[in-house]
Image (cartoon, grey):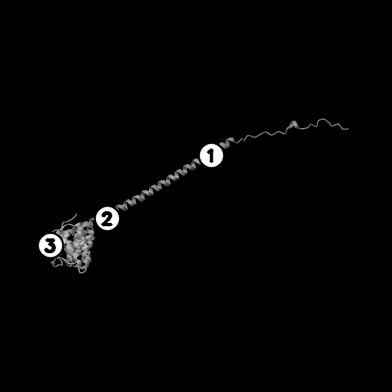
Amino acid sequence: MKKKVSFLLLLQLFSYGFCFAETEGEKLFRTNKPNEASVQLEKEILEGSASSDAYNYLGLSYLQLSDYERAISAFERGLKAVGSDKKILSFNEGNAYYSKGDYANAARCYSLSLAVDGDFTKALLNRANSYLMSKEYDKCIEDYELFLVKEPEDIQRPQIEEILSLLRKHKQEMAEAEQRAKEEAERRAKEEELLQQELERQRAEQERFEEELRLAEEEKRRKLLEDVANSLQNTDSTNMTAGAEDIISFEAEPELD
């Protein structure tokens, strides 16, 4: 969700580390004329008559107009300019990304600002808020806790402590849910293993049954063929004779010459 930044907030953001310059574009910004200011500042930058703070004024003008892309571009151009305030430009660019709803890039910009000045607690708090919006709860808790260490008397401490309490509770609930999910996954995996074992047992049993059936059928066919063969075999004995009708009789005496 995009968030419109008020002019008073922009003045507050600008005040971190800046003295108001006297160029026409900067005067227009300070009199709450962001449209005219953005045109004049672009002209001053092009002509080379702008101050080192011009890109910050320009980015804030676009930010007031909710033109987040141009605001981000102005801050980026400022970061490349020699002598510009990198800490504030990075911080305000983070605010532009945050207003746009791009919380990952917002956190990145706040980190750049903190790299320049580790005690810039406003960037630390805004980065914590960015982590909260992007649901990076571990980083969020770490930044909120560090902010409270650095700013123990901050007026927002009760709200931050309430958020921390909710985040810690949520983190605990998430850990418990993760553990339950892990245990459920293990239970299901065990059930699947047992199911596969039972299916394997049934498959082996079916194979044994089919093999026994096959062997029984083979034995049945063997016996059937054996019975048929036995029924065709003639085992009766045949009476053998000497062939008496073929024997020569010697009853008549032979005649001798």
Quadrant where the C terminus lies? Answer: top right
- Name the element at disc 3: helix
Q: What residue type is labelled 2?
A: Glu
- Name the element at disc 2: helix
- In this figure, what is the number of numbered marks? 3
Residue 63: x, y in percent? Answer: 17, 59
- The numbered mark at residue 28 is 3
Cβ–Cβ under 8 Å for marks 1 and 2: no
Find the residue positioned furthest to the bottom. Answer: 83
Camera-side mark, 3 or 2:
3
Mark 1 or 2, nearer chain start: 2
Residue 244: x, y in percent? Answer: 74, 32
Q: Nearer the viewer, residue 188 or 10?
A: 10
Residue drawn at the location 27% of the way across and 55% of the way down: 178
Cβ–Cβ under 8 Å for marks 1 and 3: no
- The numbered mark at residue 223 is 1
- The numbered mark at residue 211 is none
Quadrant where the N terminus lies? Answer: bottom left
Camera-side mark, 1 or 2:
2
State left or right for residue 200 relative to residue 154.
right
Question: Which quarter of the picture shows residue 151?
Answer: bottom left
Q: Which amino acid does label 3 sit on?
A: Leu
Per the model, the C-alpha gap separating discs 3 and 2 is 56 Å
Question: Which quarter of the picture shows residue 232?
Answer: top right
- The numbered mark at residue 178 is 2
Q: Which of 87 and 207 is in front in this view?
A: 87
Q: Nearer the viewer, residue 33 or 129?
A: 33
Q: What residue type is labelled 1?
A: Lys
Residue drawn at the location 31% of the way across and 52% of the way down: 185
Per the model, the C-alpha gap separating discs 1 and 3 is 115 Å
Per the model, the C-alpha gap separating discs 1 and 2 is 67 Å
Find the residue positioned furthest to the left. Answer: 31
